Image (cartoon, rainbow, N blue to C red):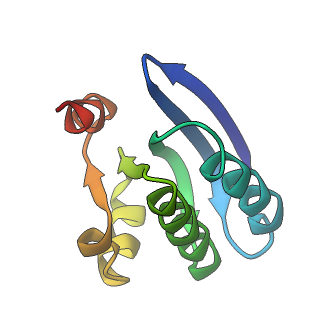
Amino acid sequence: MQIETRKVYDVLVIDIEGRLDGRTSGDIADRMVTIAQGPDKHVVLNIAKLDYLSSAGLRIILRTAKLLQGNRGELKLCSPTEGVKTVLATAGFDSLLKIYDSEKAAFAAFAP
């Protein structure tokens, strides 16, 4: 499991690669909480290289989104694979969070 961040204008992009499950969730959860409580208000979680997402991973994403919202920020997801997209839809996350097909579309959604 790898997680990297990069800044694109005023948006913080979090790139996640690998499996987000119970085994890998501890370190990722800590890092995501730190990001959510930080100064960045526009955050995009790029999950293009996420191979697997479990309920533990869903909890991390939801917690991050709620923390950001509490700090007047917003989390957007982008580029899910078909398998991950199915998990998100089955869990109802497509009604809770904004999910975009591309990073570019997620960036555009932050525009006023």
Q: Residue at x 29, y 55 (%)?
A: 99
- Residue 82, horizontal then vertical, whole percent: 33, 59
Farthest-out residue, left? 112
Q: Residue at position x 54%, y 37% from top?
A: 40
Say which quadrant the C terminus sits in: top left
Total marks placed:
0
How far across and how far down the image is residue 66, in percent?
49, 68
Would you place residue 75 above or below residue 23 in this image?
A: above
Foreground pick, 14 / 63: 63
Residue ID at (56%, 63%)? 67
Judged from this view, the residue extending furthest toward the top is 9
**In the depicted view, which residue is nearer to us: 93 or 67?**
67
Instruction: Give the answer, above or below, for where 24 lies relative to 18.
Output: below
Residue 84 lies, with reference to residue 72, above or below; the image says below
**Which percent across, then down, holds residue 4?**
67, 34
Image coords of residue 77 (percent x, y): 38, 51
92 lies left or right of 14: left
**Quarter of the image holding residue 83?**
bottom left
Residue 104, picture quadrant: top left
Residue 100 lies left or right of residue 27; in this view the side is: left
Q: Residue at x 36, y 45 (%)?
A: 78
Q: Is residue 55 left or right of residue 88?
A: right
The relative height of residue 82 versus residue 43 in the rendered view (above or below) is below
